[in-house]
Amino acid sequence: MNSFTRILFNLFALFFFVYLFRYYLTGAGGPTYLAVILVPVAFILFTLDALRNNDLYPRLKSTTNCVIAGVYIALSIVALLYIGIEFEEIGTVRAGVWSTADLVVGGLMAGLVMEYTRKRHFALFILNVFLILYAVYGWIVPGMFGHPGMGWGRILSSMSVEMATGIFSRLSQLALTVIGSFLLVLSVLRAFGCVDSIINSASRLANKSAHALPQAAVLGSMGVATVSGSGAANAITTGSATIPAMIASGIPKVNAAAIETAASLGGQLMPPVMGIAAFLMADFLGRSYFDVVARGYAPALIYYAGVIAGVYLISVRYQTGISGIPLVQTGILDKINLLTYTGVIAGLIYLMGVAKVAPMLAALRVFVATGIVVSVVFVLTTLRSRPSRDLRSLAAPFLRFIDHFATMTFDLTLLLSSLSIMTGVVVITGVTTKVGFLLMEAAGFHLVAMILVAFFFGALMGTGLPPAPTYILTALVIAPPMIKAGIDPWVIHFFAFFVAVWGELTPPTSVVAAVTSKIAEAPFMGTLFRGIQLCSALFVLMGGVFARPELVLQPGMAQLGAMGLLMAGTVGMQFSMQAKYSNKRGRDVVARIALAGFSLIVIFHPSTRWAVMAIVPIGLLVGYWFLQQRRKVL
C-alpha cells in the first residue's frame, strides 16, 4: 500500500507540475480557473504526502487512514470537476444567488482546507474558527467591535464560491502563479545539488582561519536564503551541517544554535527570492515584484551586517579553531553548481530589473535555462561513471525535482487558501476599520505611539502565526490609518514586512529557534533569547524605515546613503551589546552605553549631518576594541 501511495503521489505531482507549466507558458484559463483546478489537487497531494509518511492520523490504524484518505481524494475530485465544469455559471449567472449544490461543494472544499490548517498550522486554524464565529455571532460582542452578525450561507459563500474572498481568491492564485514560478527555480537547484554545493563551499571557507567557521554558517545561510525565502528551510538545510561543526570548534551549543537561527532568519529578507510576504507586498501595493526586490537588498544587507558583526564577536570570545572539523573537498561538480547558482541570481536580476520582464515569465525563463544546464551536466557526469548508468540513477534528480516542487507548492497553496478565509472574514466584519480607528487615536497622541501600537499588534499576531498571515493582518490593519497620517505606503508595508519576519522569532513560538535548538540539543529558550540579541538589526530596520524612509522609497543613491547610516548604527549596536571594553565593569558599561548612544543618533537623528558625524566616535570605539584584541594576541 505504501508503494502504491508513493506512485499515486508522483502521478498527481506530475499532473500538478505539467498543468502549472502549461499555464506559465500559455496563461490558459486565467488565474482564478487555475486555482479552481489546482487547489483540490493540492489537497490531494497533501493527503497522499501525509499518508506516505504515516502522518495523516497517526493514532488510527493504517486501514482507517487509507479509507479516510480515499474519501478526501474523492471529495477533492468532486469539487474539482463540479466547480471546474460550472465555473462560468457560478461566476456569472448564479453569482450572488448560488444554488445549494454550489454552497455544499464549495463548503466541502473549504472544510478540507480548514482540516489542512488544523493539522499544519493549528494557531491559524483557531484564529479562523474564532473569526468565523465572530462573523456569525457578532451581536454578542459588546462595544465598538460588535456587529449585527451574518448568516451561515453568507459565510460559506465568502469562503468558497465567491472567488474574490474564498479559497480560490488572489492569495491562492498568487501561490500558484508568481510564487510557484520561483519555486520551480528553487526546486531544480535543490534537486540537482546546487544548494548542497553552497553548503560545501561554506564548509571549505570554515577551514581558512580561526574565526571563519561561524561566518561560514552565516554566508552559507545567506547564499541559500537568496533562493529559499524561508528561515525554517534555511535552518534545516544548513544548520544540520554548520551547528555540529561550530559546537566541535568550541562554541557553546546555545550560541551555535543562535548563530544559525539569526543567519537562517535572513531567508525572509534576502532577494531575489524573499519570503512569501514580499510577494504579498507587491500584490497589496499593485507593483512589480522586482520593485520590492530592488528595495529589499538594502535592508537585507543591513541585517546580515549586524549578524556578521555579532557572530564575529562571539567567535572571538570563544576563540574558535578548526580542530576536529572535516575538510570538505569541492570538486568540479560543486564549481559548476556554484556557477549555475550565480547565473540564476544574475539572470533573475537582469530579466526583472534591466529587461523589465514580468516576474513569473522571468522565473520561467531562468528555470528552463537552469534545468537544461543542470540536466546536461548531470547526464554527462552520470554516464561517465559505470556503476551509475542505470535508469534509476538517471531518473533520481528529476523525480526529486517533481517531489520538491509539488511538496513546497501544495503546502504554500493550501496555506494561502486558508489565509484567504481569514482575510475575507476580517474584511467583511469591518475589523480593520475598527482597529484602524484605535491607531488613529494613537496617532493623535504621537506618531511614535501609533508605530508602537502597530508593532505590538503585529508582534502579537506573530506569536502564533507564520510570517505571511502576520504580514497580511498587520498590513490590512495599519496601512489605511498610517496612510491617512501621511506615511508613504512603501514605508508602511516594509515595516509590516519586518514585523512579520520578527514574528518567526517572537517568543515563545519561534519555529526557526525550535529547529536549531533541536539540532544543537540546546535549551530552546536560551537559543531564542540569544538569537534575538543577534537579530537586533530587525529592530533597527523597524525604526529606521521611519527615521530614514529613503531606505525603501526609491532605489538609488539616496537609498545607499540611508543604508550606510543604518548599517553603521547596526554594527555599533552589536558592539555595544557584545564587545568587552574593559575588565573593570564600570568602564566597560560606560563605553558600551556611549557606543549605543552614538549608534542611536546615527539611526534616528533627523539631521543627516549629525548622523554622519556620530559615525566618527562609533568608528573610534570599534577601532579601540580591535586595538585591544591585537594587544592581547601580542
Image (cartoon, helix red, strand yellow):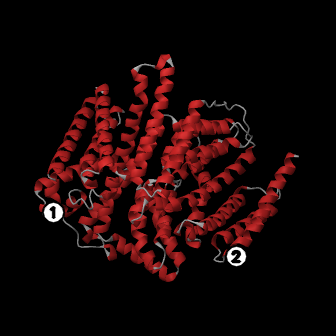
Q: Secondary structure at mark 1?
A: loop
In the picture, measured across the screen, residue 235 lies left or right of residue 360, that is right
Mark 2, Cα crowd under 10 Å, few <14 / some 14-19 / many 20+, is few
Q: What amino acid is found at the position of numbered circle 2 in the picture?
A: Arg
Residue at numbered disc 2: 609
Answer yes or no: do the residues labelled 1 and 2 have beta carbons within 8 Å?
no
Question: In the rendering, at what x and y percent does residue 94 appear?
Answer: 12, 61
Q: What amino acid is found at the position of numbered circle 1 in the picture?
A: Ala
Q: Quadrant of residue 199?
A: top right
Query: Can residue 46 be seen at all in this image of the molecule?
Result: no
Question: In the rendering, at what x and y percent does residue 275 appear?
Answer: 47, 53
Residue at numbered disc 1: 95
Question: In the rendering, at what x and y percent does residue 245 appear?
Answer: 64, 36
Rendered view: 462 above or below 225: below
Rendered view: 413 above or below 569: above
Q: Quadrant of residue 309?
A: bottom right
In the picture, measured across the screen, residue 266 lies left or right of residue 570, that is left
Mark 1, Cα crowd under 10 Å, few <14 / some 14-19 / many 20+, is some
Along the viewing direction, whichever of 353 and 213 lies nearer the viewer:
353
Residue at the (53%, 49%) spot, across then down: 346
In the picture, measured across the screen, residue 424 lies left or right of residue 629, that is left
